[in-house]
Image (cartoon, rainbow, N blue to C red):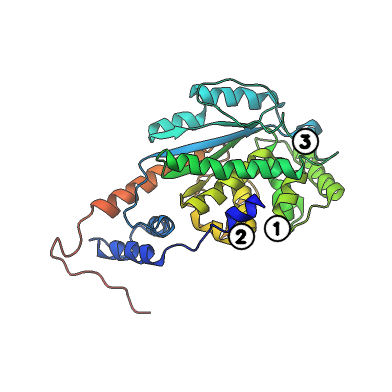
Amino acid sequence: MILQELLKEITPSSIVAQQAAEKRWQQIAKPLNGLGHLEDILIKIASLTENQKIQLSKRCVVPLCADNGVVEEGITQTDKNVTAIVTRNFSRGKTSACIMAKSTSCDVIPVDIGVAEDLTGEKLIHHKISYGTKNFTKEPAMNRTQALIAILFGIRLVRQLKNQGYRLIATGEMGIGNTTTSSAVASVLLQQDPAIMTGPGAGLSPEGIARKIQAIQKGIDLHQPDPNDPIDILRKIGGYDIAGMCGIFLGGAIYKVPILLDGLISGVAALCAARLAPNAKKCMIASHLSSEKSAELILKELDLTPLIHGNFCLGEGTGAIAAIPLLDMACAVYHGMPTFEEIAVKAYVPLKK
């Protein structure tokens, strides 16, 4: 019931702020729509935040870290202890995402939402729901209460970060086996054959991909998740990182904070959020098109256009971080460029179709 009450707080975006941002872009002394999709994104942010004066200077990436019991099925190159190693490195600033984030003045706020080891770290948020999920080829990954705890945590985290002054949140994750859980969830949400939705993850061989597809199909056949109930899907074949990010997207819509998708895993979380509350899409910005097999289908379902086509598949939030400088440059033009009137040039007008 708590979740349903929170979802009622998701309201339509502001038409007034949208129109003001559109007018600002039209007045700037440059070709109309010259920055293409970047202009669309800033208009979307203005509409979401109900403020045409867009500020993104304080931003963070939030990697949610959790283990996945399905790793027991031999569907990854490495064992699950890598999750704990990388999570510790997040707290030490020694991951790819940390190094990239530093270059664009983006804070890194890692979360232990379900790592299979006890961890310490100065910057680490501790919200361990359990020591990893269960192996979904044998039993449900988690129970419904645990799935709801993860979602509600994500929602509350956005509220806390907004209160701390953050105005842009990038999603990220770390969890060995999470391309398996995300492909499983996506297969059910989109009612697609797992063979269509499943890719190599962190570099699986053809034999490894076959095991991965087999594990996903086994979990779906065993638990029969309800395709119309994202929480049922998450609890049966999902992961804590996906559920937590689902909450982050819902929180972005509730508290009017733009949220950057990263790759496949955050895309699946975004799709779960959109199925729970269609208006949640108002806060979502697609950073890049992942090289994972199902990524394009997921973004199409969300009606989102990625900024970057870079063949990324690293995870951690790296693709989302890579998009931030593009948004900074768009904001610089939006706020700093003179208008046609100010430079005494006749304004461009839209071509008649």
Which class describes the residues within 10 Å of circle 1: few (<14), some (14-19), or many (20+)?
some
Mark found first going from the N terminus, 3 or 2: 3
Q: Position of residue 271 (x, y in %)?
A: 62, 54
Residue at point 38% right, 79% down? 353
Which class describes the residues within 10 Å of circle 2: few (<14), some (14-19), or many (20+)?
few
Is residue 334 left or right of 310 when viewed as pictured? left
The CA distance from mark 1 to mark 3 is: 21 Å
Q: Secondary structure at mark 1?
A: loop
Question: Can you identify the residue that label 3 sits on?
Answer: 70
Is residue 200 visible to the viewer in this orientation of the structure? no
Q: Residue furthest left?
A: 344
Is residue 209 left or right of 335 when viewed as pictured? right
The CA distance from mark 1 to mark 2 is: 8 Å
Which class describes the residues within 10 Å of circle 3: few (<14), some (14-19), or many (20+)?
many
Q: Is residue 56 above or below residue 226?
A: above
Q: Position of residue 24 (x, y in %)?
A: 28, 62
Q: Position of residue 213 (x, y in %)?
A: 78, 44
Asked if the residue under mark 2 is in contact with the one under mark 1, i.e. CB atoms within 8 Å, the reply is yes
Question: Can you identify the residue that label 2 sits on?
Answer: 301
Q: Secondary structure at mark 3?
A: helix
Q: Residue furthest bottom?
A: 353
- Residue type at mark 3: give it: Val
- Residue type at mark 2: give it: Glu
Q: Which dot marks residue 203?
A: none
Mark found first going from the N terminus, 1 or 3: 3
Is residue 5 visible to the viewer in this orientation of the structure? yes
Location of residue 227 by image quarter: bottom right
Question: Can you identify the residue that label 1 sits on?
Answer: 190
- Residue type at mark 1: give it: Leu
The CA distance from mark 3 to mark 2 is: 26 Å
